[in-house]
Each structure stands twice: as C-alpha cells, then as structure tokens.
Amino acid sequence: MTHPWIKEILSGDHEAFRHIVRAHQDRVWAIALSVVKYPDLAQDAVQNAFVNAFLKLRTYSGSVPFEAWLYRIAVNAALQELRKQPPLAEVSAEELEAELEEAHDESERIRIVLAKLKPNEALALQLHYLDGFSIQEITLITGWSESNAKVILHRARESMRKTMLP
Amino acid sequence: MNTSEHDPIARWMKASQAPIPITDMDALVMAEVRAVARMKARQRRYLVFAWTSFAVGLVTGVWLSGPQYGGLATSVAVSVALVFAFDAVWRQSREWFSHPLLVD
C-alpha cells in the first residue's frame, strides 16, 4: 500500500511520507542495526535513509519493488554511517567465548554472535531469514552479484553455526 | 525460501529480533523531512527569483543600450549586477526578519 502515498507526496503532501516511515521503520531499523551494530548509529542511518528516500522519491520508477528500492537506500545509509566510524577491533575466539559464557539466555547469545559478524554477513542473514528476501531480491537491495550474495550468506551461516554450536 | 522452522539459523534469527527501541522514530524522521522540504522550497524560490532578476536585467540592459555595438555586453553586466543585488537583499532579509516568503 505504498504506491498511493508516493503520488500524494509528489503532489506536495509531505506529511503523507509519515505513512511510508511507519510502514517500513522496523525493517529499515533492523537493516541499519545489522550493518552498524550500535543503536545510536543505527538511528542516524535510519534518519538519513528516510531523508534520502524522500529527496529521491521522484526518481523511483517502479521498475523494482518499492521495498527493495527503499532498503537499498537504507543499506547505503548504514554503510555510509559505518565508514564514518573507526574500524572495529577484531575480537579473538577466546574473548567471544568468554562473552558468550556470560550471556543469560539463548537470545542474548544470538545477539552477541550477530554483533560480532561482519556487517555484510549480518545484513545477509537479516535480509534472508528475517525479511524473507530471496537471493535475487538481496542482489537488488545490496548491489551484490548473485554468486557473491550466495557466498556471503553461506559464510554467515557457517560463522553463526560454528559459534552457536561449538 | 529455505527459512523453515527446522533450520536452526532461521530459529536463531527469529529469537534475535527486538522491537525498535525508539518510540517516536516517525516523529524524528518527519521533523528531518519537514526541514529538508523547507530547505528545498527555499532553494526553488531562490532560483526562480535569481533567474527572474537575470531576465529583467537582460531586458533592461537591451532597452537602455539599444541595439548598437556593446549593447549585449551592457545587458549581461546589468543582469549580473541585478542577480548580485538580489542575492544580497535575499540574504539580508533572512537575517533581518522571518519574511513570510522565506518561511513556510
């Protein structure tokens, strides 16, 4: 139900953009968080993503699903936010093991593992398993080639399995 | 889609899901969007007025200097001067008042 709003926004009703924000904010947030890892950075990325989408709305041609178009903007905004930050220090296997032992439950363990994954691997898992996108849709959203998307997803699964099932 | 419930990765990913922790995200985003829309509208108005100044300058220049040699140069000079004058007035007026033209 996104398309009717686009028409209204482009005809000058900027407030109609709120409907797009409400409909997609949870997924845009999850995508941003999977890439940047920290909530405050994710918030900046989400805001930038929606503002960029608002500014580029006139260029949306409808040749790809609106969601894919919007989530691609979200991925780019998150990557841009990530580039502003100093590179994260590499976590050793022992440090990760210690952190996982301190976790109270499985969901906390999962969140720790996801936070330690490479941004593209965490993004691939998010898009495939939580947002339910196919490999073809992931290529539209991320700009990766099909074979690259498969490799990243495979590595992400392996990393997660290895850490969760020692 | 191979995201079946039997796949441990699918189960783990579902368990990792957490709601967005910011309750008024849409209000925050809309405040940014409104600010950007206002800025864009101001830019558009600026361009319209700048080009209008240039056109008025060009016509006035031709009218003042006539069709003789150097008329075009005078016209362009008057146009550029008018655009600069417009720009100065535009900036100054933004500092002096919140002119209704400049505020949505």
Image (cartoon, coloured by chain):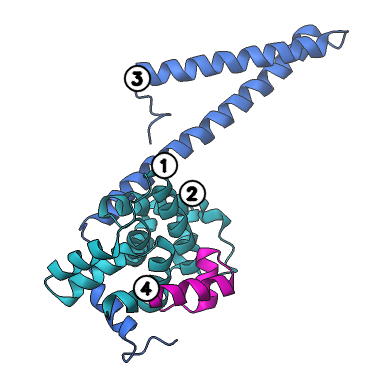
The disc, 3 or 1, on the residue closer to the chain's N-terminal end is 1
Residue holding disc 1: B36
The boundaries of the magenta stretch are A132-159
Name the amino acid, label 2. Answer: Leu
Q: Colour of chain A?
A: cyan
Question: The residue marked by circle 2 belongs to what chain?
Answer: A
Residue holding disc 4: A159
Q: Mark 1, residues whose alpha carbon is within 10 Å: few (<14), some, or many (≥20)? A: some
Asked if labels 2 and 1 touch by Cβ distance under 8 angstroms, the answer is yes
Mark 3 vs mark 1: same chain? yes
Question: The residue marked by circle 3 belongs to what chain?
Answer: B
Residue holding disc 3: B97
Asked if labels 4 and 2 touch by Cβ distance under 8 angstroms, the answer is no
Mark 2 vs mark 4: same chain? yes
Asked if labels 2 and 3 touch by Cβ distance under 8 angstroms, the answer is no
> Which residue: 41% across, 79% down?
A132
Residue B44 visible at all: yes
Chain shown in blue: B
Name the amino acid, label 4. Answer: Ser
> Which residue: 15% across, 70% down?
A101
Work out how far the residue at label 3 is from the one at label 4, CA to CA, in angstroms. 60 Å
Outermost residue to the bottom? B6
Question: The residue marked by circle 1 belongs to what chain?
Answer: B
Work out how far the residue at label 1 is from the one at label 2, CA to CA, in angstroms. 8 Å
Circle 4 — which element? helix
